[in-house]
Amino acid sequence: MKIAGATLNQTPLDWSNNLTNIKNAISEAKEEKVDILCLPELCITGYGCEDMFLYPWVAEKALEELIKLLPFTSDIGVAIGLPMWYKNHIFNTVCLVRDEQILGFQAKQKLPNYGVHYEQRWFTPWNQGQQTIHLNGKEYPFGDYTYTIDDAIIGFEICEDAWNEDRPACRLAEQKVNLILNPSASHFALNKEKSRENLVVSSSKEFDCTYVYANQLGNEAGRIIYDGDVIIAQRGNMLALGKRFSKKTFCLTSAEVDLTQTAPAPTKEKRELTTYQQFTKAITLGLFDYMRKSFSKGFVLSLSGGADSSSLLVLVAEMVKTGVKELGLEVFLRRINRSDLIGKVQSDKELTGKLLIAAYQGSKNSSDATLQSARELAESVGATFYHWTIDQPVEVAVQVVEKELGRKLDWKTDDIALQNIQAR
């Protein structure tokens, strides 16, 4: 049997884009003869809908989109995340479909309510065991079920479910489940992938099963970045690791497994990244998604020649460089909504000049060294560079404040204010 996880770069409530990404992932999985595919948590709506989850029409629309996906699921089982209303409460669920039929809905049991996650604001944790739901005249399993597809006895842990002591996997093992699917929306943090890998491998060993983890990808919305992690392990052995930080719309990772036999040979694949490399890949992916999803034409940067602004300039240039390398120049331009530049730029460095404007805003307090540093750095990556002075607008601002205060500003007593006038 061939199983897979796919990471998706979704956007909250962008129904057309989200559905297209899901269809494309399913299509590629079918081309690779995948039998069971796990997609990320809440992938139909996007994870970051926030208070929009409270509007009933969102879940209703998500269900409509799910129905549209059914014709694409012949000869493949697919786990698809969406919100569902049940008895006047909304639940974070995963629907398992196969052969154009809904098999049932699994509801998330443990809801994170810390850091950047506020799921308890919108969702209700599932603790009602096995129930049924009526949709379009049919009755479907809803809640905490297991499912059988060929040799696979399938159970679910949805993201946070797996990180609790009283986790669903403990009960799934008692039911002889041999395949656990974990659709997730787990934010990026430095070295977090090691914790995930340890969780997946140790879980597959402890519960004597195959375990598939599939995370969201990119800057879906707001300030959260997802690294697009896909991890597959069986009985304590790592089988497959997906590519993280991709700028593609989806990435598929698969593995051949025999759910009736002993553990297979582990993969030799490794994903060793330093903290600096992780940071760079995460931020450049975030910049890429922010630019294209906000329909911005590029970035404008006040380049002082100092470490902070210089780092930002390098990160934008690296975003362009790595994006063009992975996607190709034309596809990259289409992804960032800059088809107008097709045929007008021939390299990533030339494109950087179209997407990044850097301005050195000098004053009487600036040095030649910082100007030279800013200019040389901008030119080295291909950014468009401007140099102008801000002494006059700073002086005008000082005069306005002095007039209102009825006194002169002085560096001995007003140094913070004077510094901020220049900085802002």
Image (tube, rainbow, N blue to C red):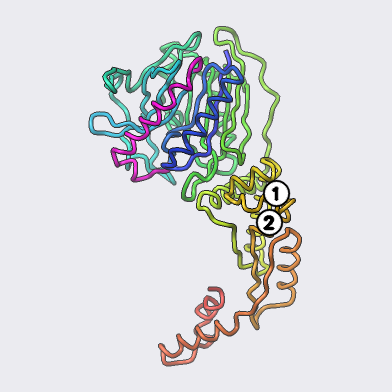
Residue at disc 2, secondary structure: helix
Report if the CB atoms under discs 2 and 1 are less than 8 Å apart: yes
Left or right of 136 on screen, residue 346: right
Which of these two is toward me, 393 or 312? Answer: 393
Q: Amino acid at mark 2?
A: Thr
Magenta range is: 48-76
Q: Position of residue 157 (x, y in %)?
A: 44, 25
**Residue occupying the point 64% across, 45% down:** 332
**Residue occupying the point 52% across, 53% down:** 295
Q: Position of residue 248 (x, y in %)?
A: 60, 38
**Residue occupying the point 46% across, 86% down:** 400
Q: Position of residue 409 (x, y in %)?
A: 50, 88
Q: Is residue 97 above or below residue 399?
A: above
63 in the magenta segment:
yes
Disc 2 to disc 1, C-alpha distance: 8 Å
Q: Amino acid at mark 1?
A: Lys
Q: Position of residue 267 (x, y in %)?
A: 67, 22
Quarter of the picture containing the N terminus is: top right
Q: Which residue is mark 2?
A: 352
Q: Quadrant of residue 272?
A: top right
42 in the magenta segment:
no
Residue 321 badge: 1
Q: Main secondary structure of the magenta part?
A: helix
**Residue occupying the point 48% across, 91% down:** 408
Neighbours of disc 1 within 10 Å: few (<14), some (14-19), many (20+): some
Q: Quadrant of residue 357?
A: bottom right
